[in-house]
Image: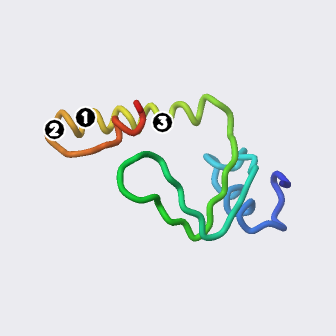
Amino acid sequence: MEKGTTSNPILALLGSNPDTKDITLAYGSPEYESRFDKYGKGRQHDYIALGEQGYDKVNETIESYYMISIIKQLNGDRTRVTNRIEN
């Protein structure tokens, strides 16, 4: 897909934010169900776009999300995030 163009509304939206402006889209699909794990049913999306933006930023986001879930667990909150990431 094109990078940095306004002819595609999704790329234009991503390009308008400094955190997402460098994303390269690889795939897009309407009415998509994502299955992340064996818990419950998948997540239904009106539209899903998959892409990449450099390993460091993606890894940092997952690590931050994981650490937040650990803190929630230590505070007594119920979350399956750690199990989903570890398994």
The percent position of residue 44, horizontal first and vertical second, equals 50, 65
* Snapshot quadrant of residue 77: top left
Q: Nearer the viewer, residue 38 or 54?
A: 38
Q: Earlier in the sequence, mark 2 or mark 3?
A: 3
Instruction: Evaluate if marks 3 and 1 touch, with contact meaning CB atoms under 8 Å apart.
Output: no
Element class at badge 2: loop
The percent position of residue 20, horizontal first and vertical second, equals 64, 49
Residue that badge 2 annotates: 75
As shown in the figure, which amino acid type bears the numbered disc 1? Ile
As shown in the figure, which amino acid type bears the numbered disc 2? Asn
Coloring applied to the structure: rainbow
Please tell me the numbered disc located at residue 71. 1
Quarter in which the N terminus is drawn? bottom right
Residue that badge 3 annotates: 62
Q: Is residue 70 positioned above or below 18 on the image? A: above
On the picture, is 72 further left or further right than 61? left
As shown in the figure, which amino acid type bears the numbered disc 3? Ile
Q: Earlier in the sequence, mark 3 or mark 1?
A: 3
